[in-house]
Amino acid sequence: MMLDIFRPLPPQARRETRAAYQEFLTARDGAMDIEKQQLVRREVGMLRYEKPLPRTREVDRDLFNAQYASFDAKVTTPSEMLLLLALVKANAAEAFGVTQVFDAIHRRAVKNNDMCELTLMVEETYHTRILLSTALSYGVEMRAPYKPPVALRTLIAGVSVTPEAVSRPLTLAAEILGLCTFLNLLERSREVLRHDPELRDGVEERLCEVITDELGHMSFNRACLGPAGFAQVRLMLPIVARGVAGVVPEIRALGAGTLASESEIAGLASGRRLPEHVVKSAFLS
């Protein structure tokens, strides 16, 4: 794998990429129930993730609940709990974003007879469920995604109504940042859970499922932009990275935060940080 993330595709290649991605999504996800916001094959796959491991791990529930409600970096928190907190909060912004844009994207999908982006929105709901299911291994049931801070909710709501010429480059920048963060979480989870191979493998499976989808999301958004859009992404990326660096402080406390440095982008573009099976399974363009 070698991908020039900031290189725009020619118009014909962009159209071909989107058509190929739609075929990929149909094969990967199956039919969509728009009313329920469900994908047939993903529902089947969730049965595996939402089944707890044979042995429930111990966790300090009082500390977990307190740090989940309002994280305090000054409070001593075990790295394993930091990882759990990071995982169950990592998709909070995306989960909130889906609630803001789903109806508008649905209308656009019907108008353009193009279901790609709507499918991406529904995939995000599965990412939230997949990551929340990690808590089941500790006997903790998370029924709803974490609500992001008011400032971030306001920003997401604002972006949802901005013209696509502005929102699309911002979306691609966010997808790149998300991928860097999930890769950092994957690497940290291997270290933090090295004493518990069963749990480590379960967390890695979940993160790899999300990363596989996110590579496709990045590829889709790349296929929606021309040269001017990519120029905006280059300018936006470091600004957005600094702006959201503290949104999930548990990720930073765990040492899994990202500012989308040149080395991180190079690692993503080359594929050297990606598990081989993820590269083989993902849609990349």
Image (cartoon, rainbow, N blue to C red):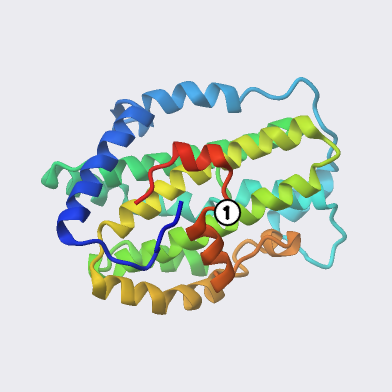
Residue drawn where x is 72% and y is 52% of the image: 188
Disc count in the image? 1
Up the image or down, 92 lies above or below 123; here it is below
196 or 5, nearer to the observer: 5
Query: In the rendered image, which residue does mark 1 sit on?
Result: 272
Residue drawn where x is 50% and y is 70% of the image: 151
User: How far across and how far down the image is residue 53, in percent?
Assistant: 73, 24
User: How far across and how far down the image is residue 8, in percent?
Assistant: 28, 65
Instruction: Classify 10 Å Cα crowding around label 1: few (below 14), some (14-19), many (20 and above).
Output: few
Left or right of 111: which side holds 88?
right
Residue drawn where x is 83% and y is 68% of the image: 74
Up the image or down, 60 lies above or below 26; here it is below
Residue drawn where x is 27% and y is 47% of the image: 103
Q: Give the residue type that dot 1 points to.
A: Arg
Q: Is residue 158 visible?
A: no
Q: Residue furthest front?
A: 2
264 or 86, nearer to the observer: 264
User: How far across and how far down the image is residue 176, in percent?
Assistant: 46, 61
What element does badge 1 sit on?
loop
Tell me the quarter of the picture where residue 137 sits: top right
User: How far across and how far down the image is residue 29, in percent?
Assistant: 37, 30
Up the image or down, 133 lies above or below 223; here it is above
Left or right of 234: which side holds 262?
right
22 or 93, nearer to the observer: 22
Q: Is residue 231 visible?
A: yes
Left or right of 92: which side holds 160?
left
Up the image or down, 70 lies above or below 112; here it is below
